[in-house]
Image: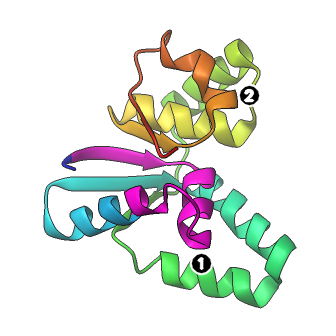
Amino acid sequence: MSGKYILDACSVIAYLAKEDGSDIIETLINDAIDSETEVLMHKINFFEVFYDTWRSQGEATAVTVYELFKKLPVKIIDSISDELMTEAARLKNGYHMSVADSFALASAKLNCAALVTSDHHEFGPVEKSEGITFLWIR
């Protein structure tokens, strides 16, 4: 899969837990090593993964997951530009989604990337109206 992709938290959680759709994330990661595939994730979205892991498996596991994730060919976006903040706020207001989901969506839009997710509930209404491509993992 060549192109540019933004991971949201549920896609990474599925990957880590080897749930349905984890094979798609694994393919993206492998392709990012060998090809013109670029995989990104906003740090706010990784925060959700970190928090979920900490809550369910403890701090030590969360830290280990984070250290391992940083070794993957996934670029972590750790800044919030004015443009990103404004777009995320617009999307959150317009679709009443979580802050983290609005950042994933805004990151995809501003980076001209497909959003990788399984969260049809949050993103389904956005798919047809915002011109953002989605890669649904299930």
Residue 21's disc number: none
**Residue appearing at x 77%, y 65% in the figure:** 52
Give the answer, above or below, for where 138 lies relative to 58: above
Which mark sits nearer the N-terminus, 2 or 1?
1
* Residue behind mark 1: 66
Front in this rendered view, residue 44 or 7 = 7
* Residue behind mark 2: 97
Give the answer, above or below, for where 120 lies relative to 96: below
How many marks on residues? 2
Give the answer, above or below, for where 11 lies relative to 13: above
Measured as percent of width and height from the top left, residue 22 is found at 48, 62
* Residue 75 seen in the figure: no
| Residue type pointed to by label 2 | Met
Question: Marks 2 and 1: CB-CB under 8 Å?
Answer: no
Q: CA distance from mark 2 to mark 1?
A: 25 Å
Q: Within 10 Å of the Cα at label 2, are there few (<14), some (14-19), or many (20+) other Cα atoms?
A: some
**Residue appearing at x 50%, y 19% in the figure:** 127
Task: Give the secondary structure at mark 1.
Answer: helix
* Residue numbers of the magenta segment: 3-25
Task: Give the secondary structure at mark 2.
Answer: loop
Front in this rendered view, residue 94 or 124 = 124
* Relative horizontal placement of residue 38, taking residue 51 as reference (left or right): left
**Residue appearing at x 70%, y 69% in the figure:** 50
| Residue type pointed to by label 1 | Tyr
Measured as percent of width and height from the top left, residue 75 is found at 39, 61
**Residue appearing at x 63%, y 32% in the figure:** 102
